[in-house]
Amino acid sequence: MLPALPSRLSLFLAAAIALLAPAWAQAAPQAPLPIRIGVYGPFTGGSSPMGLSMRDGIRLATAEINAGGGLLGRPLQLVERDDEANNQRGSRIAQELVQMKVTAAVGIVNTGVALASQHYFQDARIPVLTAVATGSIITKQFLQPHYAENYVFRVSNSDAIQAAMIVEEAVERRRFKRLAIIHDTTNYGQLGREDLEKALTAKGLKPVSIEHFNLGEIDLTRQLQRARDAGAEAILAYGIGPELAALANGRAKLHWEAPLIGGWTLSMSSFIDNAGPNAEGARMPLTFIDEGTSLKRRQFLDAYLKASGAPRIPVPSAAAQGYDAMLLLAAAIRQAGSTDGPRLKAALENLRDKVEGVVQIYERPFSPNDHEAIDRLDTPVMGEVRGGRVVHAYGVRLRHVP
């Protein structure tokens, strides 16, 4: 028996289904595309305590934003890369992130990496928020008249501010006049040394000795001996944690009690752990100290430790600045109603709403002519290593603290 031929009705229905199928497929709900944010810093190597702290602060802010529904109806997605504190690698990462068309970049720990890489974002008109690197030139690399626009912003304590605070601590508060500068040979150390010399010149002083060291050096007694022979009363230091520990240990080996005052990197866990008791008394300018001086800060500290599973934050100020940088970027995206680079830049330069960070409450932190979020008068404090941790050297100051 031959099979029954299909009826006209069944043929019509089959044709209709075939025609409508593409329309049904297009109408099916799809997950919104994420807003991709580039995040890079040193997640391995000697600078990694700063990089990991910053990254985890950024992750924490991103998780909170996504838990609240994301931005513009879309989730945030972090594209993380380890630059190993290497300028060339950082440059390649920046090119990769630009090619991926990230909405913005947040991060950067090392001054040299920033100077080598941020021009790729500048050329692509993609905002970059530097959360840790402190070289004074970082936000001034693309100023007029050579550049019509500047896409580089910063949420950390510039070396110009730090150098002034370091010299004020040594000269005004502690009455030292004979000072030695000992710095590393990276961009960070060289530029920091220049800022220290400028700050000393403003006080009518010159260093009695300027010494330098390379990354990886573990015996700095020769540099210290020369500084002591020059009659230095205190050491002004610019370097990264491991080498700063060698500096403190070398000072102890020489039985020299000259105070150690330097950049914020003296707060790194790698300095405190490797120097042990020799780190005691070291002082440094900081934007954030991990003491729960407010509800917002206690919540941040508790959430960070819970999310990271670590017993402490390796570099609290790096974590706090990374967290705040992401909040400021999120505020700009909301205000702009867009992920377009020029519109985000314009929003950052004129943020209408206050942003409650953990470093401070930000009220119009940037302007077209000022891309520095941290003001010396409002935020930085002097920290001191006591009992193996960093505390306020002169008590808690609560101005503009959330």
Image (cartoon, rainbow, N blue to C red):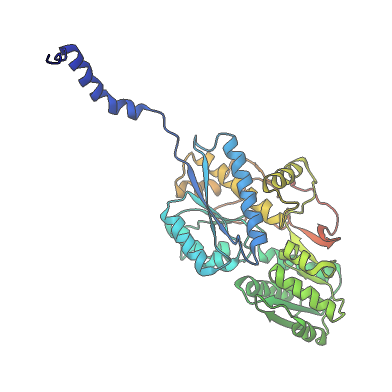
Residue 313 visible in this rendered orientation of the protein: yes
Against 392, residue 21 (above or below) is: above
Answer left or right for 202 relative to 22: right
Residue at left offset 50%, top offset 69%: 88
Against 361, residue 157 (above or below) is: below
List x then y, in percent, for residue 42.
Answer: 60, 62
List x then y, in percent, for residue 297.
Answer: 74, 45
- Splitting the image into 4 quarters, where does residue 231 fall? bottom right
Residue 199 visible in this rendered orientation of the protein: no
Against 243, residue 19 (above or below) is: above
Residue at left offset 70%, top offset 55%: 317
Answer left or right for 311 relative to 81: right
List x then y, in percent, for residue 390.
Answer: 80, 58
- Splitting the image into 4 quarters, where does residue 32 fall? top left
Question: Which sits in the foreground, 56 or 130?
Answer: 56
- Quadrant including the N terminus: top left
Residue at left offset 57%, top offset 52%: 367
Against 260, residue 223 (above or below) is: below
List x then y, in percent, for residue 245.
Answer: 76, 71
Answer left or right for 183 relative to 3: right
Question: Which sits in the foreground, 97 or 326?
Answer: 97
Residue at the extreme front: 1
Answer left or right for 398 relative to 53: right
- Quadrant including the C terminus: top right
Residue at the extreme left: 2
Question: Which sits in the foreground, 13 or 375?
Answer: 13
